[in-house]
Image (cartoon, grey):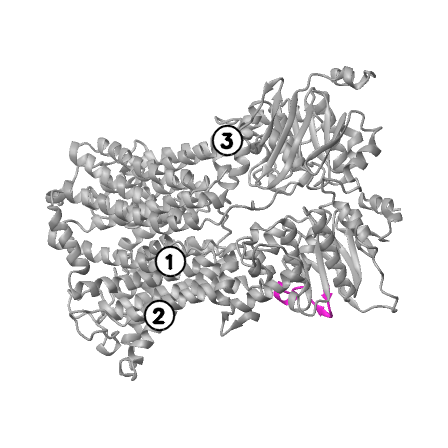
Amino acid sequence: MTDIPYQLPGIPSAAYSDILGRIAIPVIAVVAAFLVGLVAVMAMGVPLDRAVSAFINGAFGSAYSISASLNRSISLALVGIGFVIAARAGLTNVGGEGQIAMGGVFATALCLAPGIAELPFGLSFIIPLVGGAIAGGVWGAIAGFLKVRAGANEVITTLLLSFIAIWLLYWSVQSENLLRQPMTSSATLPESLSIPASTQVPLLTGSYTSPVTWGLPLTIVIAIAAAIILSRSVFGFNLKAIGFNPVAAARAGIAVGAGVVTALFVAGALGGLAGALMLQGEQYSLKAGFSSNYGFDGLVVGLLARNSITGVIAGAVLFGFMRSGGISMEMMASVPSALVGIIQGLIVVSIAGAAYFLDRRSAR
Amino acid sequence: MSQGTAVQDVPTPAEKTEPQPLLALSGVGKRFGEFSALSDIDIAFNAHEGHCLLGENGAGKSTLCNLVFGIHQPTSGDMRLDGALYAPANPRDAMRHGVAMVHQHFSLINELPVIDNLLIGKKFGRLNRKAEAEKIMTLATEFGLGLAPFEIVGDLSVGQRQRIEIVKCLMQRPRLLILDEPTAVLLPEEINSLLDVCRRVAESGCAVAMVTHKLAEIARVADRVTVLRGGRAVAHSADPSNDMDVLVRAMISREGEAGDNRNFGVSALPPRKLAPHRGPLPEAMQIDNLSFVDEIGVKRLDSVTLTIAEGEIVGVAGVEGNGQSELGSILAGLSHATSGRWFAAGHELTTAKPRQITAAGVGVIPEDRHLVASIGQLSLADNLQLGRMQGFARYGLIDRKRQREEARTLMQRFDVRAPDSQSAFSTLSGGNQQKAVLARELTTSNLRFLLAAHPTRGLDIGAIEAVYTYIRQAADQETGVLLISSELDELLAVADRIVVFYRGRIIGERAAKIDNRDDIGSLMSGKTP
Amino acid sequence: MTMELFVVFLASSVRLAIPLLFAATGEYVSERAGIVNMSVEGMMLTGAFGGALGTAMTGSPYFGLLFAVVIVLPVALLQSVLTNTLRANQVVTGIGINILVLGLTTLGYRQFFGNRSREMITGFNAWSPPFLGDLPVIGPIFHQAGLAYLAVAIIIALAWFMSRTGAGVALRAAGEDPHAVAISGVPVITLRHGAVLFTGLMAALGGAFLSIAEIHTFTEGMTRGAGYLAIVAVIFGNWKIWRIVLACLLFGAATALQFQLPAIGVQLPNALLIMMPYLLALLAVAGLVGRQIAPRALAQPFWK
């Protein structure tokens, strides 16, 4: 057995091209995708200035639109941070959508539970938030447990769990025995009762003209904490070791199974928290389409960030504002918001494809 | 067949009978970055001949094969096939030129039946498995190869799988067949029949190139032998049976000249001072009737019982694949014994997890440095403290400054050379990587027992010497050591006594004295006195 | 349940299973070659859109079918290049393509159908094969769109191809150990390109079935996860073609039950029935129902 050096020494650390990859490629992809979007707008015969001003107005034209965009970014950021944490342990959490749904369902149940609304010191909205987070966390941890116990691939299990959660959500707003509001007529919508005001997450400004909630500072704190945990804590280090080489990590005494389950619990909990915040901060009642693809978009944000929390924040803000802009473009300039989907899809596909040029070196 | 014997029978001087070579390499060299795996190789492979490439681990044998088979491309020199320039871009290209190779790692699909494996890449249309199997069986029997064409490959033994690989090569009617250490994985009785097959293939007119580091095999197959050492061809013989002594000396030359020679590292060690006899010593480790059956039902370890006293170094000798790896894996906590128990430092560790094994005072140098002992993408400092980060933490956060200082201390103490403690582990040389692993394992708190599996594999002389110096130091401080190695000379130089593994059993035990070398050698081949 | 009702139930189970059968057997080929296409959802949606558009433009469902295949080709090609040439993450690119395609088809739908979105397109009519269709009692089960019989033919041919031809064996081997296959002289990357394109073809047919033969129109995002369900069928079918066929039929039956149960007075939440395929697949991968063995090299990019 001839020993060839495992990895060839002497390759200077790719600091330069790393910067190129981490910043230049996403920027180019985003700009190019937007240009395609502009061309599409022109092709549809909509005056460009009208579409663009509608988009900008919707995204950050007013205090209200900025707040709405930020609320969207919060959900994406939480799911994205969770994704990055799981990815550190080499796990791909595709289950954001289901974790949001479970968070929403349990937060609703707690908000409507007798006695919760009367709790003092803000516990009336904190307990449902925590409950939603735990529900999402458990949903994620199931995938972790199945991976450790049965060797089930977490991409498959988190995806399946997502669909199950989406239908559990559907079930819970369809059945009066669960969360559906009492049917007073045949026109009663299949959704839950509105949650009591005391269980709603308070607005940062206290005014509905800029309805950004306390979820924003909470998310910022979580992002900072996640960055510190990943880069400086023993837990973050162990996750990294598990992600790179689970066998060596196990041999060195790191509890690999517990690490896997915990990582997916944390990822799921952040998804659940996002769900709880969406419910208690924005929608106030549970409906079937509640998670509306925030899970998948958040996953994409996490993936494109290439393992960096800063990247997640940038991506979440971009996608959050794009969603708002797209909705406004549809209403004000009759450009279908599907265009935003096209732009997002293009960004995802081109950045994922461009990874080849960054990874080729290390894979060889 | 008659041609083959004709060439051998001509008893004239070598120069005059030198046939037109089928494949000739001239001045071939291969560098991987800074590392020169092969340099300035001149070698010729002739039709009708078996040609052995002899050399110790790391001599460049496999690299040479990979160049000929198009897996790597030479960085200098050229190769000529039948006089025409031959530069295979990939294995497919090589195969088109009639070059086939049996790899150390089989390229078989375990999930598929034998016949499907044999037909992959050869037939794309409709398969008539029965008819194809008959044709293949005819070919296989011609060379004395038995096959069960409809069995699933995953259910077969290693020897059977190797036969499939060989048949797969022969189906292309190759002009040159390369076998990379084909006997390393075989049982002794399988080895003989493999060598016969090689012989027949050569007699059929094919050139056979076989890599080995076992001298005994040469006499049976080789018309020619080339010895490689340190990436150079250092000796050549067209009459290997009579030149055996020369070849041995060339292969394991103890002069310690330019090329790296593994044994030199050991011979530079001072003789081991045995601790003064203090009566029966306390046990560092005890294995009691340990057996292990793998997932396909093969008994890899068979009732192994062994006790190691404090301060004692026990060597495990044996041809690779006789249960040593499985023992290593069990003692490392990566798998659990099927039956039996084992203890270290007074704790039963039969079902313990790696963390508990480490906590009991057991250090482990696993045989696979890259996959098990270290994490290449992490820094040197991180690898030095893998699994011990808690010790540098306050409120769960790692004190990087303290961790770096501690890493620097370890680097100094164990002479781990790297630009910085933050260098990526994968950029270190093999020797420094291994010293780092040793540094970590030997500083396990309350170290009482050390498992060292092939700790010098692939290392240069200086590193080998350092590794054994540290291991001995540990033994001098009352640590019991189990040293698994395929290098008998290293075991003889380093250990106090040697147990020999054969088919999962300990079939004999000898004091580690040079006089016992032949005796141990024959035990390794399964011969009990 | 009366026999008549039961036969209606069986017929609608089969009908609901057809699009799944197309997509799942297509995805089966890719996964056997080592590739997961999350984009099978997007490919189906594109096929549904192309089928509806082609039919609406020409009035011929046959042209619609052809157009569905043609329009899916670039989508499959995009997935294939990303996966095989650029070795991009298969899950991400698949989801990315789904987002992209959802946008494109929605936009295209508004452009082309905008003001006549209520119109139905001519579609394939159901057809009864001679003999089988005339059988007493169970005859109605065979009253299906001709595409259903195309699916049966393709699946039989595919099963033969995968087990009885060298290319099929090489393809399965490429999903287990692509390096070993490459050493045997098989062009793994080409093979995998072919597999993804085949998945595209089958997903196009499945999608077109939805729009042309089933609903007779296109609606935004009309596949509603059918592509993902096809992937689930492959998982639940343990990557074996006949089991995948059974899984599709089972999933079809679960959907059909939603409409049948209320008719016979059984109150079971719809959600539970729709959820069942995912739950079953989850139990299967968890090892609670048999042992799932995925192709060893599934979702791993192949670097030479």
> Which secondary structure, mark 3?
loop
Q: Do callouts 2 and 3 point to residues on the same chain?
A: no
Mark 3 burial class by Cα count in 10 Å: few <14, some 14-19, many 20+: many
- Out of C170 and B80, give the one closest to the viewer: B80
Q: Gap in Å between the C-alphas at discs 1 and 3?
A: 36 Å
> Which secondary structure, mark 1?
loop
Observer able to see residue C281: yes
Kind of residue at disc 2: Val
Q: In which quarter of the view is residue A164 placed?
A: bottom left
Is residue A98 located in the magenta-colored stretch of the structure?
Answer: no
Q: Residue at x 64, y 40 (%)?
A: B156
Q: Which mark is residue B433?
A: none
Q: Gap in Å between the C-alphas at discs 1 and 2?
A: 23 Å
* Residue annotated with mark 3: C186
Q: Residue at x 29, y 66 (%)?
A: A172
- Relative side of A42 to A314, left or right: left
Q: Is residue C130 above or below residue B309?
A: above
Which residues fall within the magenta stretch? B340-357
Q: Gap in Å between the C-alphas at discs 2 and 3?
A: 53 Å
Kind of residue at disc 3: Val
Observer able to see residue C230: no
> Which secondary structure, mark 2?
helix
* Residue annotated with mark 2: A221
Q: Position of residue C180 (x, y in %)?
A: 55, 37
Q: Position of residue C46 (x, y in %)?
A: 26, 41
